[in-house]
Amino acid sequence: MSYKLSKKQIKTYNEEGFIVIDNVIDEHFLNKVKLATTKIVEKASFIDKSDDKYDLADNHSKGKPSVRRIKQPHSFDNIFKELLFYPSIIEKVKSLLGKNFRLHNGKMNLKSPSAGDLVDWHQDWAFYPHSNDDVLAVGIMLDDMTSENGTVLFVPGSHKGKIYNHHHNGYFAGAIDLEKEKIDLNNIFEVIGKAGSITIHHARLLHASKPNNSNSMRRFLLWEFAANDAWPLMGINNYNDFNKNIISGDIINTPRLSNVPVRMPLPAALNQGSIFENQKVITKNKIDILTKK
């Protein structure tokens, strides 16, 4: 059985900047991931502020934990490490990046009915520009994704355009000013899918996600991958740790330089911690603009 992407899927990714694939994660394994996620969230009841493992929602309390993001879940739970090396995902990423790629970042965004924050329009590339743009994110739906519970929104083809200004009042804010940038949102693709489905989107693709207005949880795990010869322009902290993040292929010490548009995320965001915190300073992009069609 081949897990590789078809020529049609690769063409769609190159043209549109994303693809959605149904039924990638086995249901039995997915249930293990869900159970592990529940246990991790329960342990958040022991803390009262965000740390290097949790990003807590504003309504979090020790009696009723509310987690917006679990950071690097593969680093402290083996079921997520298995998911990171899930054969079907690995082969699909190879179809787009080749055999040499590393994990840039891992995270799970959780949108609970009570605190399902929207994520404003942005490009991942604005947060972590590299020496070339063979950089993408694989999103894994742990729950069904619907129009009501915080679906992801993509702007097809936007990965081929400019890198928009994600600053606000002189500081990086992780979101763009739709009116100032004159963004056309008449061609939005809304991601709807069953649990176990995945998305793959280019790091330069313009995207957002709606708030959770349903009565059910929406959990979405993201693996951000980069080609081994794509080096982060913000630098690396530890060369050995950098190479330990290689998922497939060889260590490459000669970055490939491409003529790609870059805006550095500096000066740094006033609100550190996560995109949810970064974007708190943005007030212009109301939900009616976010979901305009």
Image (spheres, rainbow, N blue to C red):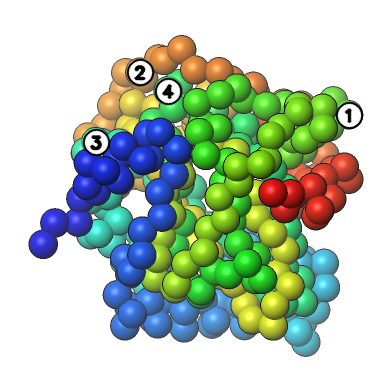
Side of 42 where 242 appears, left or right: left
Distance from disc 4 to disc 1, alpha carbons, whole Å, reads 28 Å
The foreground one among 60 and 114 is 114
- Residue 97, image x and y in percent? 30, 36
* Residue where numbered disc 1 is placed: 169
Distance from disc 3 to disc 4, alpha carbons, whole Å, reads 14 Å
Marks 4 & 2, CB-CB < 8 Å contact: yes
* Residue where numbered disc 3 is placed: 98
User: Label for residue 269?
Assistant: none
The quadrant where residue 267 appears: top right
Marks 3 & 4, CB-CB < 8 Å contact: no
Residue at left 40%, top 65%? 197
Assign a secondary structure to mark 1. Answer: loop
- Residue 171 shows in this picture: no
Distance from disc 4 to disc 2, alpha carbons, whole Å, reads 6 Å
User: Label for residue 132?
Assistant: 4
Amino acid residing under circle 2: Arg
Marks 2 & 1, CB-CB < 8 Å contact: no
Assign a secondary structure to mark 2. Answer: loop
Label 1 environment density (alpha carbons within 10 Å; few <14, some 14–19, many ≥20):
few
The quadrant where residue 227 appears: top left
Distance from disc 2 to disc 3, alpha carbons, whole Å, reads 14 Å
N-terminal-most mark, 2 or 1 = 1
Assign a secondary structure to mark 4. Answer: loop
* Residue where numbered disc 2 is placed: 256
